[in-house]
Image: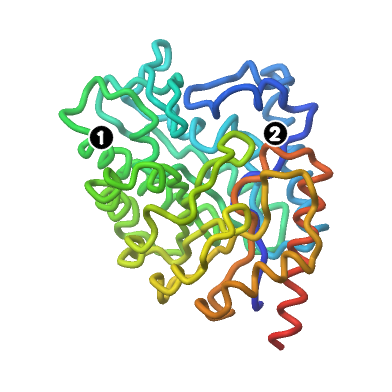
Amino acid sequence: MLLPTSLVGSYTQPDWLIDKVKLAGRFPPRVRATELWRIDPEWREQAFDDATILAIRDQERAGLDIITDGEMRRESYSNRFATALEGVDLDNPGVALDRSGEPNPVPRVTGKIRRRHAVETRDVAFLRANTNRMIKITVPGPFTMAQQAQNDFYADEAEMAHDYAVAVNAEIKDLFAAGADIVQIDEPYMQARPAKAREFGLDALRTALDGVRGRTALHICFGYAALIHERPEGYNFLPELADTDLCDISIETAQSNLDCSILEKLTGKTIILGVLDLSTHMVETPEAVAARIRRALPYVPAEKLVIAPDCGLKYLPRDVAFGKMQAMAQGAAIVRAELA
């Protein structure tokens, strides 16, 4: 289908599942934050399954073509995977500066990073069993996890990022084996810390993709709009991704009113185009979404576009998130008809 629609990854979690006041009142958790859940541990897995089905059905009702699990099981996009790895002291967290410059509790690395077991394969299998549409699953990127950790073991960050990448590589292969159509790596810190991303982040990304057979994507953004309010005029790190084995690259254009001409530097890549402004609870009209899609068409062939929000919908009220998804699908349909 021309101009298929998809979430970046997360959908808003039900209020009965997670305390959204606590969630919004802090930085995204890098260590485990089980106090956010409203459901007792013995019933939590069942609740996660039920919430995932709600997220799937909302996406289908809104008209989305590529379905995610909404990340219903996660306190943040990264901490569920990052804290499941060997080499991390979960009882004594470290501290690192968030992309806003503020200190945040993070995993403290005290040994060699290794993947003990597959972390998200059941998530994929459950998603695959509950929709007949294309499915996508997300995993945090090695560079971003290395930036969200206190290094008390490795000689340098590059070595630590490499071992994170080896763990991500194994996870990605297992996610495709479990039924994923698309696996997306989330690497927001490549935009936040471009010098380090050039120094060793790209090498870590290549390690994460080594030998992977399947459609891979990478999401790079300016941070959750609910928490990071100011947007730069353009990306500090984006053309560097052209020379990778990635199939898709997910970027945001709506809130930042991004100059889409930069997308010409990603020739051959499918662009997951962010067209929903998540800094506001105002639901866009389909016509506004269509206008944002048209801005990219001079620089990216329509057959190389996937239409998505700027970032995850995690922090939005459910009615707003659903309305924005629906407007996105309708806006894509407008442009699809024009192109036909």
Residue 260 point in image, percent of width and height = 52, 68
Q: In the picture, residue 276 is in which quadrant? A: bottom right
Q: Determine the residue positioned at 42% across, 35% down.
A: 117
Of residues 163 and 313, which is closer to you in this image?
313
Q: CA distance from mark 2 to mark 1?
A: 32 Å
Nearer to us in this view, 155 or 238: 238
Q: Which element type, helix, strand or loop, lies under badge 1?
A: helix
Name the spot of residue 302 as percent of width and height, x first: 59, 79
Give the residue displayed 50% in from the left and 77% down from the top: 299
The colour style of the image is rainbow
Q: Amino acid at mark 2?
A: Phe
Tell me the residue that label 2 is attached to.
Answer: 48
Dot label at residue 160: 1
Amino acid type, mark 1 = Met
Residue that lies at the very extreme toward the top in this rendered image = 92
Reply above or below: 318 against 202. above
Rendered position, 69 above or below 85: below
The one of 114 and 145 positioned closer to us in this rendering: 145
Residue 117 badge? none
